[in-house]
Amino acid sequence: AQKVTQAQTEISVVEKEDVTLDCVYETRDTTYYLFWYKQPPSGELVFLIRRNSFDEQNEISGRYSWNFQKSTSSFNFTITASQVVDSAVYFCALKGDYKLSFGAGTTVTVRA
Amino acid sequence: SAVISQKPSRDICQRGTSLTIQCQVDSQVTMMFWYRQQPGQSLTLIATANQGSEATYESGFVIDKFPISRPNLTFSTLTVSNMSPEDSSIYLCSVEGLGSSYNEQFFGPGTRLTVL
């Protein structure tokens, strides 16, 4: 069985603040993949990043960065200098054997 | 990434009727999936659409309620049968297995279904 927990239901920040989204996962698979997706108000699901279980290097892409710590089973996501366009629901997901399991999602609201 | 389209983008249906949702991908993919997202909720996998054979359903979902077809490697349909208001959700098609993006799943724009 696999499980993804996003403990933060909603986060509200003022523009230019940094925001960190927490993701904790459980799996018995030795090989697995972790993902972050963004779902803006329009509803489409936008792929942000994939990380495999053997690669613990942190990654930065523009204002986005991800911190993967296998020891604590966490894959946290930080948005630096947030903008109004970052307002969305963000989902963390885990893929083990074949099934992609999603966390409950964190709603981020960035106020101007 | 692939271009994934879904039809219809939204619909309002009467209870007891059925709706078929189409998913078209612009290139061949190995895996296609159907997800449901109920209002304010996360995504739940309904089934894996298998090309040329019966779909593989997750616990809580049955073929009679959600029949799925996948006649080739670029197209799939999901039917929501005998609808009730509880079926009001966003239904999303997802694909995996596009060249170097193996193990990455991309999603279609979704179909917003409202059942009255």
Image: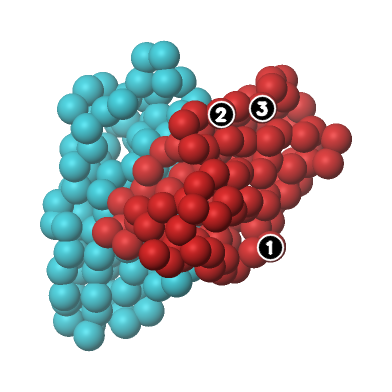
Question: Spatial distance from mark 3 to mark 1, Cα to Cα?
Answer: 21 Å
Residue furthest toward the top? B100
The picture quadrant where one finds residue B115 is bottom left
- Asked if residue A11 can be seen in this view, the reply is yes
Question: Spatial distance from mark 2 to mark 3, Cα to Cα?
Answer: 7 Å
Residue on which disc 2 sits: A60
Q: Amino acid at mark 1?
A: Ala
* Left or right side of A71 for B5: left
Residue on which disc 1 sits: A7
Question: Spatial distance from mark 2 to mark 1, Cα to Cα?
Answer: 23 Å
Specify which label sits upstream in the sequence, 3 or 1: 1
- Asked if residue A102 can be seen in this view, the reply is no
Of residues A61 and B36, the one nearer the viewer is A61
Within 10 Å of disc 3 (Cα), the crowding (few <14, some 14-19, many 20+) is few
Chain A is which colour? red
Q: Residue at x 68, y 41 (%)?
A: A75
Of residues A6 and A98, the one nearer the viewer is A6
Q: Are marks 2 and 3 on the same chain?
A: yes
- Closest to the camera, between mark 2 and mark 1, is 2
Image position, residue B40 (x, y; %): 45, 71
* Secondary element at tag 1: loop
Is there a contact, CB below 8 Å, between mark 3 and mark 1?
no
Q: Are marks 2 and 1 on the same chain?
A: yes
Is there a contact, CB below 8 Å, between mark 2 and mark 1?
no
Q: Chain of mark 1?
A: A
Q: Are marks 3 and 1 on the same chain?
A: yes
Q: Residue at x 79, y 33 (%)?
A: A70
Is there a contact, CB below 8 Å, between mark 2 and mark 3?
yes
- Closest to the camera, between mark 3 and mark 1, is 3
Residue on which disc 3 sits: A58
Chain B is which colour? cyan
